[in-house]
Image (spheres, helix red, strand yellow):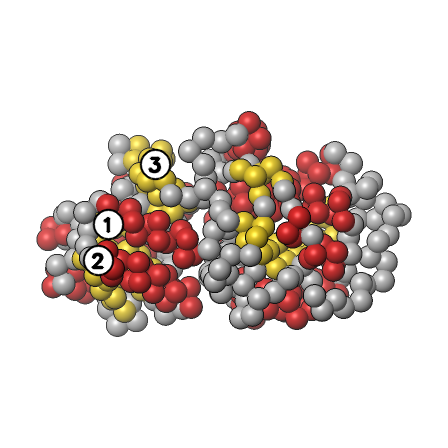
Amino acid sequence: MNTPPSPPGSERTDGSAVRIGALVPLTRPGWVDAGRHLLAGLELSVREVNDAGGIAGRPLELVVRDTAADPQRAAAAVDELARLDVAALVGEYHSVVARAAAARADALGLPFLCSSAVLDALTEQPTEWVARLAPAQSHGWQIYADFVLGAGHSRIAVAAEPSVYWASGARILRDHLAPRGGTLIELDMRALTPEAVCDELVGHRATALLLLVGHPEPAVPIVKSVRRDQRLAEILIGAPAGQPEFSEFATSLGDDSAAIPFLRYLPERLSPLGARVETALRERLAEAPSFVAFEGYDTIAVLTDVLRSHGTDRARIAESWPRVAVEGTRGQIRFSRTPGISVWQWAWAPVQVVDRDPAEPDRFRILHIG
């Protein structure tokens, strides 16, 4: 590994804080609910570490920067955090933002433990500096495609916006569906109104529509239009990217938010650690924690283990990824080199397809386990 010199004072033992840079979307157009849950998990875990004596007597300190779903803003934040002498970076939910952050972290020799972004190609070239907890998009979205096929759908439309993330998702779905008798119909949301989407679905005889679009716009108006079109009463609406996970989705759509299957990364049953963390997160968030909050908690749990075992030197942190073995809230976390993935990857966090129960939209139903 090309190892730049450690910053001065990187192994201080004077009780000063060990700084961790945290990248989180906290304002629009970022997915604010996801950012709030991610930060809650990070903060809870940091508090517990500090209550247990910190890192060799030094407290952990989160230095939080709002990315607002902006890749350039994230890259600038990485530069700033590196100058602030953080030992490592954590966080980020949006894949295109995490990709910009990972490229910058790799260039600077700054360890980055990515909590939530799933894009397979998180960096252009293989890197030793970046590790990831979330399952790669290809892994989760293939499981989702199997669920849709198993539910009897072979003509599947995607309402898609232009972005690396949505294009990657559409490609994964198409490549997985085609050999199994499925057809993917792409609807370009730059050219279609939500009402026109309904006409396209009827014209193409699609029986499923997957939302590869942002929330609340245009996801909410698309769902409302499709739900109100009598010609589409039997169509399945799906959201592999997980928009229905957050309460904002249910608030925006009411009963229309139910029965929209999405991916989430939780086990069928939480371990005792997971159950304890769920209770603490629920108290902190004043609502049920999403899988993203657990990702935040697990990120700090992993990084704490690394810091306690290998110290705060950046190069030693990055060199330790393959030696990680940490009991997280959703299973034992280990990193490996996975074909097609350019970063150290936990293969894999548990994957579920769930939806909101039409009879009780605040309750989730597990429909399929990957």
Q: Do the residues bearing badges 2 and 1 touch, measured as CB atoms within 8 Å?
A: yes
Instruction: Tell me the kind of residue under disc 1.
Output: Leu
Residue 209 is situated, as x and y percent measured from the top left of the image, at: 24, 55
Q: Looking at the image, which is closer to me, 241 or 151?
A: 151
Q: Is residue 353 left or right of residue 186?
A: right
Q: Earlier in the sequence, mark 1 or mark 3?
A: 1
Residue at x 61% of width, y 59% of height:
130
Instruction: Tell me the kind of residue under disc 2.
Output: Gly
Residue at x 59% of width, y 46% of height:
334
Disc 3 element:
strand
Q: Is residue 144 left or right of residue 178?
A: right
Residue under label 3 = 366
Per the rendering, the mark at residue 193 is none
Q: Nearer the viewer, mark 1 or mark 3?
A: 1
Per the rendering, the mark at residue 182 is 2
Residue 352 is situated, as x and y percent measured from the top left of the image, at: 38, 42
Q: CA distance from mark 1 to mark 3?
A: 17 Å
Q: Quadrant of residue 113?
A: bottom right
Q: Earlier in the sequence, mark 2 or mark 3?
A: 2
Q: CA distance from mark 2 to mark 1?
A: 7 Å
Residue farthest right in this picture: 14
Residue at x 12% of width, y 59% of height:
205
Instruction: Give the quadrant of the N terminus.
Output: bottom right
